[in-house]
Amino acid sequence: MLRDLSERMGWMREPSAEDLGRRARRIERFLWPWQQLLKPSVTGWENIPEQRPLLFVGNHTLFGVLDAPLLWLALYREKGILLRGLGDRLHFQIPGWRELLTRYGVVLADPEVCGQLMQQGEAILVFPGGAREVTKRKGERYKLIWKERRGFARLAAQHQCTIIPFASVGIEDMFDVVLDGDELAASPLGAVLERLRIRKDVLMPLAVGKGPLGLPRLQRLYFHFGAPIPSEGIDPEDDAAVWDLREATRHSIEESIAMLRQAQRHDPKRFLFFP
């Protein structure tokens, strides 16, 4: 069992303005080479309102950590927003990694923690697809894999939190999945993984880059923030209304993904190094 969340991850402690600025500058220096390689295009800034709290809900892309930091940096630079990401419990079971995430504002994806952040007027980042959406199977490029999850919508309704749907495109065009998690689980290795009690939904696929020598096919990243979706007036105990809120968010993200892929196909500067 994890210890008390507020003690374990410091989710109640607000970084000072000085700490925030120092950490943001450190992240900016660290991400500078990655940002120069991918030169992200970000649209939809006008859809981010001033009121708080905000819940940014988007599609998790393959491997999960290749585009989210650039989204975090873009929001801080443009809007002064420090996103508090919600992380899978698995992240907080890895020594060193959990401390790094916590230092930069990531907290456990727990309803109590998320609710407290909303009460404090925070801007929160959530990927309802979670680990399963990171470990994409063959044929699942840019698909939302939310199953029946609606917890984020219920929490938003409970705390009158405005949802900002967003989409990310680019990472999943850099790789081809050669062997996915289902195939790994069905292989002789699957018995070993089962004995080790490794969750099937976190089995990373074996993927190769689509560029020369199996390297990632480097190309521009695209982000888009959709129109805000208010949650005021929605009864969190009304399952149908909560589901409608969830579905409105999903539809917005899927529309933004389609729009970005269309823009991507017609962008003469899409491929930065090799076509």
Image (tube, grey):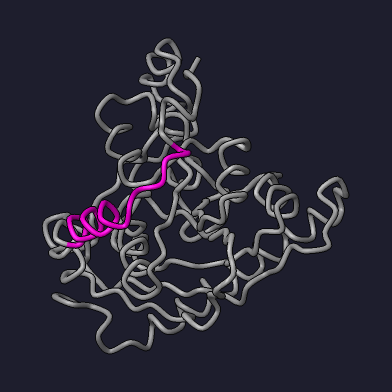
Q: In the depicted view, which residue is nearer to us: 210 or 3?
A: 3
Placement of 245 over or under 131, stated as above or below: below
Q: Residue at x 26, y 51 (%)?
A: 19
Placement of 247 over or under 135, stated as above or below: below
Q: Is residue 124 shown left or right of residue 223?
A: right
Work out whether residue 63 can be spotted. Answer: no
Q: In the depicted view, which residue is nearer to us: 215 or 230?
A: 230
Q: How many marks?
A: 0
Magenta stretch, main secondary structure, is helix
Q: Residue at x 46, y 77 (%)?
A: 260
Q: In the depicted view, which residue is nearer to us: 39 or 84?
A: 84
Work out whether residue 237 can be spotted. Answer: yes
| In magenta segment, residue 25 | yes
Residue 64 % position (x, y): 38, 49
Stretch in magenta: 11-28
Q: Is residue 221 shown left or right of residue 49?
A: left
Quadrant location of the C terminus in the rendered image: bottom left
Q: Is residue 146 shown left or right of residue 263?
A: right
Residue 249 % position (x, y): 66, 64
Residue 22 % position (x, y): 21, 55
Q: Residue at x 50, y 41 (%)?
A: 132
Which quarter of the picture shows residue 255? bottom right
Placement of 110 over or under 25, stated as above or below: above
Placement of 132 over or under 55, stated as above or below: above
Q: Is residue 78 shown left or right of residue 31?
A: right
| In magenta segment, residue 147 | no
Which quarter of the picture shows residue 156? bottom right
